[in-house]
Amino acid sequence: MLKLKLARIREEQMREVGKIDSQGHVTVKKRPISDDEDDDLEKQVRKKIDLEELESADLDDEQKEMRWRQLSPEQLEVATLQLYERGGYSPTYGDVNDTMPGIEVLDEKSDMEDLLKRRREHRKQPAGVSKIEADMLAIARKGMEGDESTFSVEQPLETQSHLWSDKYRPRKPTYLNRVQTGFDWNKYNQTHYDMDNPPPKIVQGYKFNIFYPDLLDPSETPSFTVTPCDDPDFAVIRFKAGPPYEDIAFKCVNREWEVSHKHGYKCQFQNGVFQLWFVFKRYRYRR
């Protein structure tokens, strides 16, 4: 790029020494330009470029900008090349005392520790779950035992129509349901099975945890209904709440419940979580 600039300067000098003939044509006295003249031209371009003077600490930003504006295109190019060779456009370390007001200077070690802490906190929270929902999941998982497992098989419902659907977008609630299974050591199983060859596991109870964090009227407690299926061994339990939540239903075993609190029965709505926990009655067979 610098050589092109020098070539243009040489062409301008050649035009100055030219003469105009009677017909208006320019005749140029051609003479070779020596290497010494090339060096003189290069020195002419580079002269009066003092980066220390341009970037003096005694100057404010406005004064520095004015000095840069006074440079010719050739001088500006030379200055930028010198700056590139000097620092490669890499930022230099500044003095803490020169920091602008309102800017917090962080220690590198402390900043890395804070970053790692935030990453650990983020890993504890399930992906795609808000903090409120994560707290609700923690409540639902509390006290989960080895004989319990989660299940999420929903029962299809008819198309639901709500009066508030025009104002609020209906959505299904999230949930974390647990089913408790175990062995029923009745007289028949005691006769035909033992600990080495146990009987098949049966469902002994359920723990439904339905989340309603955005219920418009938190004072309205969600409710549930139990409807028998075509198969008498099963029933459909349906949960209903106010806007903006739709009804949700699950298919469960149809047996008689223990409704005593000492047997673990729970039906409550607290902190946006509706919990329905129950176990089935155990029948004792007599001869």
Image (cartoon, grey):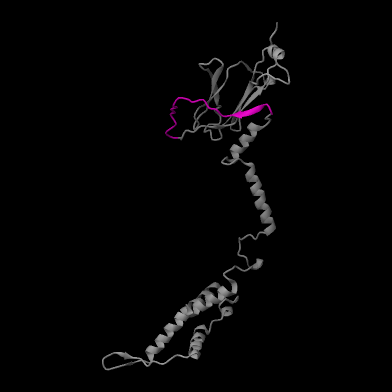
Q: Residue at x 63, y 22 (%)?
A: 205
Q: Residue at x 66, y 59 (%)?
A: 106
Q: Nearer the viewer, residue 122 or 219?
A: 122
Q: Quadrant of residue 212?
A: top right
Q: Quadrant of residue 19?
A: bottom left
* Residue projecting furthest to the right: 195
Q: Is residue 82 above or below residue 38?
A: above
Magenta span main SS: loop
Query: What is the tally of numbered marks visible in this picture?
Result: 0
Q: Residue at x 50, y 90 (%)?
A: 36
Assess whether residue 233 is covered by the magenta stretch: no
* Residue projecting furthest to the top: 287
Q: Position of residue 11 (x, y in %)?
A: 40, 86
Q: Position of residue 99 (x, y in %)?
A: 62, 65
* Residue projecting furthest to the left: 23
From where the camera sits, is residue 71 visible? no
Q: Position of residue 184 (x, y in %)?
A: 68, 17
Q: Position of residue 127 (x, y in %)?
A: 58, 41
What span is in magenta?
A: 146-167
- Image quarter (top left, top right, bottom left or bottom right) of the C terminus: top right
Q: Residue at x 51, y 25 (%)?
A: 155
Assess whether residue 165 is covered by the magenta stretch: yes
From where the camera sits, is residue 139 visible? yes
